[in-house]
Image: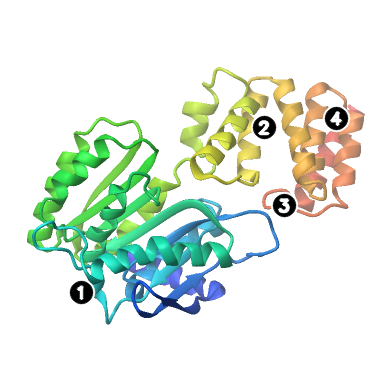
Amino acid sequence: MKNFYSLLISLFFVLNIQSQAIYKTINSYKLEGDRELKIQLPRNYNPEEKRTYPLIIVLDGDYLFEPIAGNIDYQSYWEDIPDCIVVGIKQANTRSDDFFYDDESFFPAHEGAAFYEFIGAELLPYIEDNYKASNFRIIVGHDLSANFINYYLFKDQPIFRAFVALSPDLAPEMNYRLGERIKILQQETFYYLATGDADIKSLRSSIIESDSLISSIKNDKLLYKFDDFEDANHYGLVGRGVPKALNQIFGLFKPINAKEYKEKVLTYEGSPYDYLVKKYEDIEYFYGFEKKLIENDIRAIAAASNKKDDLESLEKLTKLVKKNFPDSMLSAYYSGMLYEKEGNLRKALIQYKSGLLLQPSQFIDKEIMLEKMYDTQEALND
């Protein structure tokens, strides 16, 4: 299992070559000096487009940026999660100051308070002024920085929607305070917490206690996930926790899989097409951006429409495909499928033939179009 995760992390780093980090320096009046940033933009990032991207702020960016950026690049390539903007803050020489908290109040003080304000008052405006970042923001930390991210939950209106705490070194009273704050959350908030059986003993004990407390809280606005990894130490658990956290945060965004198809699409009270519309509306509501229609979901809804003999649903899906993919074989393929279901094989054949002149998609290529064309022609001759 160790070798598997090592291979997976290596693969993330290799793929990440195609989306190299941009190094920027921001001058901060809060910190009274410069702070270096690492920024990864999506592969096909276009500043002229209207779309925006979820923003991921990575503390301890000197070593934590690459695992996060690599995971984002890999999973978004396969459309499992959305393209994101990843920003890492370099803190190697300022770490103890940045995460400083008062010995009595246990809240950020002095340099720690300045760093806390820097993120909200300077860093976020800088990123939003220069890049297409959405309001759906994630913050990630490990060890001391994983404790620090919790302080942003205590704002009346938290500036982050998702928190990833990897083996946090929790401040005194943080468990109690965190529990009290989570009880009264008013906005859907994702919270991921992780430790491992070989984690630092003192940290692990506090984290297990924190999980017990959070798990007992009843609040529909909290979307919580905890992992206690086997055979994982304080540093190794990062490579395993990051993809699990992203899966938790972007669970709704994921393509329709076999489980969702069987348990939700086929059992949905409305039509399969209605399910698709609601899924994409929910994504926009939760994440604040519109998801582009993907072929995997088209196939799932078409299969459900066929299984239920729901021609109306298939017709609506076909129109949606034509609108979104006018130059793709997809439009001809699903138009032909609709005509076949209606019993109009001649029109179906015309659609399949016309598709040969269009661009292939992820799953539909020339061979498939020819096969459909020959099958339809044979059915006509019978």
Q: Nearer the viewer, mark 3 or mark 4?
A: 3
Earlier in the chain: of badge 1 and badge 2, it is 1
Which badge, 1 or 3, is on the more N-terminal residue? 1
The correct choice, above or below, for 122 with respect to 161 in the image is below
Under circle 4, the secondary element is helix
What amino acid is at disc 3?
Ser
- Residue 332: horizontal and vertical position, in percent? 82, 41
Q: Position of residue 8 (x, y in %)?
A: 39, 65
Visible in this render: residue 38? yes
Q: CA distance from mark 1 to mark 3?
A: 51 Å
- Going by the numbered disc 2, the residue's amino acid type is Ala
Q: Position of residue 108 (x, y in %)?
A: 22, 62
Which residue shows up at 85% across the image and 46% down it?
355
**Residue 143 shown left or right of residue 74 in the figure:** left
N-terminal-most mark, 2 or 4: 2
Task: Judge depth for marks 2 and 4 and give the one in front.
Answer: 2
Report which quarter residue 188 is drawn in: top left
Name the residue beneath numbered marker 2: 302
For disc 1, the marked residue is 96
The nearer-to-camera label among 1 and 2 is 1
Q: Is the Cβ of the residue at disc 1 closer than 8 Å to that at disc 3?
A: no
Disc 3 to disc 4, C-alpha distance: 26 Å
